[in-house]
Structure formats: C-alpha cells, structure tokens
Amino acid sequence: MAIHVALSHITHYRYDRLVRLGPQVVRLRPAPHSRTKVLSYSQRVEPATHFVNWQQDPFANHQARLVFPEPTTEFKITIDLVVEMAVHNPFDFFLEPQAEQFPFEYAEAQRRELAPYLAAEPLTPRLAAYLAGIARDRRRTIDCLVDINQRLRRDIDYTIRMEPGVQTPEETLQRQRGSCRDSGWLLVQLLRHLGLAARFVSGYLIQLAPDVKSIDGPSGPERDFTDLHAWCEVFLPGAGWIGLDPTSGLLAGEGHIPLACTPQPGSAAPVEGAVDECEVAFEHHMAVRRVHESPRVTRPYTDEQWAAVLALGDQVDADLTRHDVRLTQGGEPTYVATSDRDAAEWNTEALGPTKRGYATELLGRLRERYGQGGFVHMGQGKWYPGEQLPRWALSVFWRADGEPCWNNPALLADERDEAHCTSDDARRFAQALARRLGLSTQYITAGHEDTWYYLWRERRLPVNVDPFDSRLDDELERLRLRRVFEQGLSSVVGYVLPLQANAGHPALGGTVWSTGPWFFRDERLYLVPGDSPMGYRLPLDSLPWAAAG
C-alpha cells in the first residue's frame, strides 16, 4: 500500500544589484534510474524571461541549461514533485556467479565501460590505514559491502556543514566527522581502492514518520522530513548500481531519490553557473507533505470510512440472505520466528528444526485458552503441488456447550519430549484397547514395510551407491531408504486392530464393538510405501470383496 508524497524545494538567490547570469545548469530532476516512482514533476524559474534546454549529461542524468538574456536582481528555482513511496526491498537483486564472493574481477569489456568509476585518488596515510583495517578474506560480496557501510557510519560522525565543496577522504578521516557528501565521497574512494566501481550520488532524501514505534531498534523520524542528501552507488554485475548510504549505514531505499550520479562530486552539484561580482543573499526551503494514503495495517480506515465499510457489509449480508446464499470465512495466519527468521523452515521448507516444536507449544496454548476439555489431533493437512509429502495439520477440537471431550490432558503426549514410542508400545496399546472393548486380541495384525518394493528400489540404485549413501539426488528418497534399511525390512512398523461399531441394546451400554480377521494374499500386512504414519498407509484395497447386500 503506497503513500503519495509531494515535495517542494525552493532555491532563491537575491543580489544587491543588477547582475548578468551566465548559463546556469540545474540538476534537480530525478534521475532515470530512480526506483521511487515519480508521478509528477515541475520546475519553475524566475526571472520568467529565460531559455531552457533540457539535456542529459554524459552519465545520463537530467539537467536543465538556463540562459538569461537580461540582467536581474534575483534567481529563483521552484521544484514540485509527487512520488509514490512504495516500500521496496533494497536486497532484491541477484549477482552474477563470479561476483557473489568478494573480491572479484570485472570482465574486461565491463572494466573499460566502468573506467571513470574505477579511477581512485592517490592513497594518503589515513586512507591507507583505514583500508588496511578492512578484511580482505573471501566472503559474500553483499556482506562485505554492508560491513564497510556500517563501519563508516560508526567511525564518521554526521555534521551539517554549510561550507561549499567536499572534504578529501584524508580530511574526513582526520576530523572523524563530515556531512553526507563527505562520507559519501569517502565511501566512493574506499570502494574504488578495493577494485569496485563506485559513483557519487546527489539527491533528495524523504523520511516519513512511522505509524507505530519499532519494538526492536530505532523508530525513525518523529515527523515527515526531506532534504538534499548525498550517498554512494556501487556497480555489481548482475544487480547494476546499488545505493549505499554511509550516513545511516543502510542500503538506499524508497526514500532515496537520486538527482545526479557522477564519477566526481563537482559534476553532481544541484546548481552550477557564473554570476557577476555582487553580494548574495541565499534562501533555501524544503517541505514534504502526504497527499494520498492508502489504508494499511498500521494506519487503518478513519471512523467515517469504517462506517461506510460496515454499511456496505450490511447491504451485502442483506442481499445474500435474500438470495439464500450461505458463506463461511476462515483465516490462515502465517507465523515467522523472531529469531533466525531467514531460515528455510520459515520461507521455503515445510518443516525444520524448530517449527514443529513452536507449533506444538502454540497448539497447547490455544487449547488452554479456548478449548478446555478438548482433544488434540495431529494429522495430515494440505498437499501442495510439487511436494512429495502432505503438510501436517495440528488441530484442537472442543464442544461449544462446554461438555468435555477429554478429561485428562496429561495423557496427551508431547512430541517435544525425548522419549520415543516403539512398535512394542503400539502392540501393548492395541492389546489393552481390545481388552477394554471386550474383544479378542487374536486379530491384532502386525504391519511391515513392503519388502519387495524396497528390494526392487535398491536394485535400481547405481552400482556405486548403497541405501546408506549420501549421494542420492532426492533428499527425501535418501532419508526414506536409509530409514527403512536401518530398521530392517522384517521389522514391525506398528499394529492394526480392525474395529466395527454396532448399535447395541441400551441395557448393554449402547455401542457394541466387534472385530475380525483381515486376510492378505501374502499372509502379511504390507504397508503402502511412504513416510506417513502407518494409519495412512494401510492397504485398504486388499479388504475382502463383499456384495453390497
């Protein structure tokens, strides 16, 4: 959900006499590669009697060349633009394989094209010492750039400096402070000495006050803010130019709107030109305001808007009732751990080392809060296309009238405990269940993995791979074969007790249970091959055929 922001920027020069202005070059139009979408832009210049020629400099930046035929006592530039502040991920890019690890070399043709951005100034003592402190060990390129950027933020204090020009890297390191243009130029030189193409960027910075305060870290500005700013861009094969802001230690985001990107800071000055000798009074004003805000989670609808939504909902409900349409609605929130949130189990994988444990803990909390007297069921859930196995579905069920379905929560096993049940436990449970229901235990049947299937699967393996080998391409198949062969093809997986509920005489207590034999061609119950619990893999198609009557 985007926010539309209007930015106003006024630059006003007043002269103490009539003066002639030489050609003035104005670089206050967003660059073509700005990731922030520019919805409208205007530039007004006073005096009105002038000629304007829009150009692109050798580095593809927009610039206006102004010519004033008559003397004047003032020169005023008013910029108005509206941008769409839609959040984007500054790390949303890929690198060419050869550039994924630092250090790397540009291709020869690319190096020639980037020559102006690789030209480093001679090393000075403090710059050389600072470079020596940067680790050159081989590591991910983006990690290296983030570390350098954040190190500059820690080592160079930010200050507002009204003097014209840019400090040399040596001066900035000596003073340990500088303006945004000083730290930006220092970062450019550091990267060039490390063999990376870098350029100086002059632009607008828009920072909006957050709707809610951050719970872990800085919350940002107290009010909406804009100003002229400077930072650095580095060229990474596969990603292009990536912005680094050493003032904040962050990558450039949607609030960074580049105006001019050049090899040298002098070529990125917002206004450049000559004027007759005179006394000058300079005024500079910038403001930003929100002109459109879409409702969002952190700043939802106003009371009036919400009342209109409710009224529309009532109308829809009435129409559905009139046409006898019945609808149900459910929710499916997605949870991500507060720690290690980039792990595969929170992004791409169905399970991982912690997800199932967190889910079990949450299920217990939900049962305690909402489902007192309820019971827990852990079974199969959705089966997504392309995945070998269905996901798990952890459910808790309870009666709306408060009547308990389960009286002893201590009997509900917690799989987070270290103890694991065996097939012997399953056999004792089946026998105890049969006796509790008043049935014979002779029809309890052991279940086995399909010996013939796994022997056939083993014969299909390459001659130099055995079931315990780690070189099988399919990880799930590797784990499956290893598990089956480690437990042994003759091992019992679990036990089955066939049951049927029959309506009994009320005097006998209602339901009467019966059991009986389950016949198999091989006189052994072989499970359907797979990884699911035994109950999902019963060979139900082998049940004896019987007429419907």
Image (spheres, helix red, strand yellow):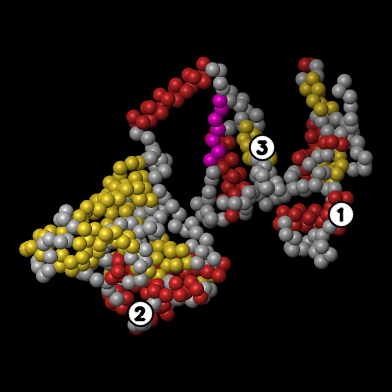
Of callouts 2 and 1, the N-terminal one: 2
For the point 47% across and 69% down, which residue is it? Answer: 144
**What segment is highlighted magenta in the picture?**
327-333
Residue 317 appears in the picture as rendered: yes
Q: Secondary structure at mark 3?
A: strand
Residue 109 drawn at (x, y percent): 50, 73
Tell me the residue at 85%/48% (across/down).
450
Q: Residue at x 84, y 52 (%)?
A: 454
| Amino acid at circle 3 | His
Marks 3/2 in contact by CB < 8 Å: the verdict is no
Q: Amino acid at mark 1?
A: Leu
Q: CA distance from mark 3 to mark 2?
A: 69 Å
Q: Earlier in the sequence, mark 3 or mark 2?
A: 2
The tag earlier along the polypeptide, 1 or 3, is 3
Residue 455, label in figure: 1
Q: Nearer the viewer, mark 1 or mark 3?
A: 1
* Whether residue 395 is situated above or below residue 478 in the rendered picture: above
